[in-house]
Amino acid sequence: MSWQIDVGLEVHVELNTASKIFCSCSTAFGAGPNSLCCPVCTGHPGALPVFNKKVLEYAVRTGLALGCEIADITFFDRKNYFYPDQPRGYQISQLYATVCRGGGLEIDGPGGSRLIPLIELHMEDDAGKLVYGENGELYIDYNRSGVPLLEIVTAPELHSDWEVSAFLEELIGVLRAIGVSDCRMQEGSMRVDVNLSVRRKGESLGTRTEMKNLSSLRSVRQAIRYESKRQIEILESGGNIENETRRWDEDRGISLPMRAKEEKEDYRYFPDPDLPPVKISRELLETQRGLIPELPRAKRRRYMRDFMLPEQDCRTLTADISVAKLFEETVSLGIPPLEASKWICGDYLRLMKEGAGEHMTAEKLARIITMVSEGMLTRANGRQVLEALFYTQGDPDKYAEEKGLFRIDDRNAVEKAVREIMENFPVQVEECRAGKQKLMDFLMGQVMRKLEGRGDPSLIMSLLNNAIFQDKQ
């Protein structure tokens, strides 16, 4: 009998606020250990929290984008547990009156699109970070303590590693588009807990395990494949699954037990007495609704319909709002959509991954594409201009002129280069005349090298043919 995998996610998203959720400390990434903390976020006795309104705005905007029901009144609860990275001995979270409930996110798959239902979205503060030393000593960095989190909880209705990956990619696109989080998993601004169980088809949900704090899509996929296989093997051998929290060992590619799985009762939730209930006004709802742009899924469908682009290109272009903006601006300047897509999905994104390109505008990109399409630059030299101006200010025409990159279409100059190559490679010329056509490519390459890659290929080929065959006759 076949097995079914059931996965529910708890996605922890750090919000793009300048300050923490209950104090004025900065949320900047990469500062020195314990340099961005105060008595509030380090849990000093008597230090009182003050709620950051921007966190509520981002939570409401996210809920609206995901089709959630927004609460009229929401409040915070204390989630009690003791761990070194939680200085107060409790986390400020939400259980009884979460800010958003319901909603869902549509994903695409081999069988078509499917809506993945959400259970809730709630606000909470992040814990600190444990850092292990070379000799096993343990350090705590409280810079992250108090950074605002939005936890997005799905129903257990994802059934494979690729479905989970598709859901997370779609979610990342939405969160970035609405401007609430950068979702940089490598910096910890998005972390995923995977709740996974297996069952035989037709049976009820099995006993689940929870794998904590997965920090890359690759880790999520690997962890799901490993843990589902582990559970199936236990059940097929007559064993039972323990309801436990496990950690994913990235280096060994296995999940390991951490502790028995806590239930809600174990955390002894109760309303936080230091934070009053928050009323969500109709004005706040409408303001946040108006800040939601066209979402990636709708944009992707529009690109496929209006620009006739391949689906994968559309996914790439809409994964980042700045990339989509550049594409649309470039097309508005008269560049054919397919040509703009090729340049952006290829060389532009390669450079973008290598470093921030602050100076590449749609006007510059459009001019580079035009110079290549009109034959003024070879594709290789067009790439050189793009790379040079990606990091610095400058004009494409001026740069190409200064560096001598414009294509040589002067017939006399090309004829001279052809004659010189034929004189330098007489054996190859004779063998080409004798029928070795592959040597034509060799000779053409030599001419192009002589012209420093700036020759017109069609002109070079025409002149070579004339010189080798017609002149001989």
Image (spheres, rainbow, N blue to C red):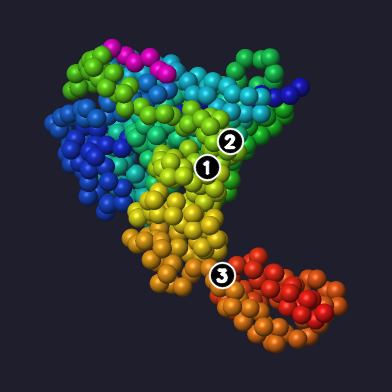
| Depth check, front residue: 205 or 465 | 465
Q: Kindly identify which residue carries mark 1.
A: 337
- Identify the element where label 1 is drawn: helix
Q: Give the residue displayed 37% in from the left and 40% down from the top.
A: 182
The numbered disc on residue 409 is 3
- Identify the element where label 3 is drawn: loop
Q: Main secondary structure of the magenta part?
A: loop
Query: Left or right of 449: which side holds 140?
Result: left
**CA–CA distance between discs 1 and 3?**
28 Å
Label 1 close to label 2 by CB (< 8 Å): yes
In the rendered image, the vertical position of residue 70 relative to residue 337, given as above or below: above
Judged by depth in the image, the label closer to the viewer, 1 or 3, is 3
Give the mark nearest the N terminus, 1 or 3.
1
Query: Left or right of 419: which side holds 196?
Result: left
The numbered disc on residue 93 is none
Q: Residues within 10 Å of mark 1 (few under 14, many from 20)?
A: some
- Identify the element where label 2 is drawn: loop
Query: Left or right of 100: which side holds 251?
Result: right
Quadrant in the rendering for residue 148? top left
Figure quadrant of the C terminus: bottom right
- Residue 314 x/y as whole percent: 54, 38
| Depth check, front residue: 147 or 324 | 324
- Residue 425 x/y as whole percent: 72, 85
Please name the amino acid that badge 1 sits on: Pro
| Depth check, front residue: 299 or 32 | 299
- Residue 86 x/y as whole percent: 30, 36
